[in-house]
Image (tube, grey):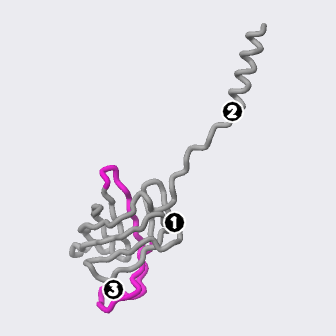
Amino acid sequence: MKRVIFLIVILALAACTITPKPAQPALNTDTIAGFWSGKVAGRLETGQELPSRDIGILIIAGCSIGKVCGKMAEDDQCPGPIILKNVDGNRYYFLSETVSGTQYLCAKGDFRTLELELRSDGTIYFVHKNGATLTGILQRK
C-alpha cells in the first residue's frame, strides 16, 4: 500500500512539474555580424536581366530590431544604412536607404527591402527588391 501511495505522489509531482519554455532565438544581428560581399544578378519586374553587381554589407553585432545595424553598398558606390526590421529564424529583414551620393545610381532617399538568409554552409542568400530584384550568394570576409 505504501508503494502505491508513493507511486501516486511521484506521478502527481511529475505531472505538476513546470516544463521550461524552449529558448527563444535571438532577435539581433550577432549570428550574421561582419563584412559580407559577393556578386549578385538582377532582373526587372518585366523579366529583363540587369548587369551583375558587387554587393558589400557591413553588419554590426548586437544590433536589434528598429536600429541602424550597418551599411550596404552596390559596386562600391553609395553606401547607405540598413535598419533591421525583423528576424525570423535564419532570415533577417532589413530596410536599406541611400541617403547620400552624387552619382545617378544613388537615387537619393531611395528605400529598398533587403532579405538575408543565413545558410547552413555559412554563406548568406541575398535578396534585394526595389522595382528590380537582385539575388546572389554573399561570403563573409
Q: Position of residue 62 (x, y in %)?
A: 48, 63
Q: Residues within 10 Å of mark 3 (few under 14, many from 20)?
A: some
Q: Position of residue 34 (x, y in %)?
A: 36, 64
Residue drawn at the location 38% of the way across and 80% of the way down: 80
The residue positioned farthest toward the bottom in the image shown: 102
Q: Residues within 10 Å of mark 1 (few under 14, many from 20)?
A: some
- For residue 26: magenta? no
Q: Earlier in the sequence, mark 2 or mark 3?
A: 2
How far, Cα to Cα, is label 2 from label 3?
A: 59 Å
Q: Is residue 10 left or right of residue 122?
A: right
The quadrant holding residue 114 is bottom left
Residue drawn at the location 61% of the way across and 43% of the way down: 21
Residue drawn at the location 23% of the way across and 68% of the way down: 39
Element on which disc 2 rests: loop
Task: Give me the disc on residue 17.
Answer: 2
The residue positioned farthest toward the left in the image shown: 51
Task: Give me the disc on residue 21.
Answer: none
Element on which disc 1 rests: loop
How far, Cα to Cα, is label 3 from label 1?
A: 26 Å
Q: Is residue 71 left or right of residue 65?
A: left
Label 1 with label 2: CB-CB less than 8 Å: no
Q: Which residue is mark 1?
A: 64
Image: magenta residue range: 95-122
Q: Which residue is mark 3?
A: 106
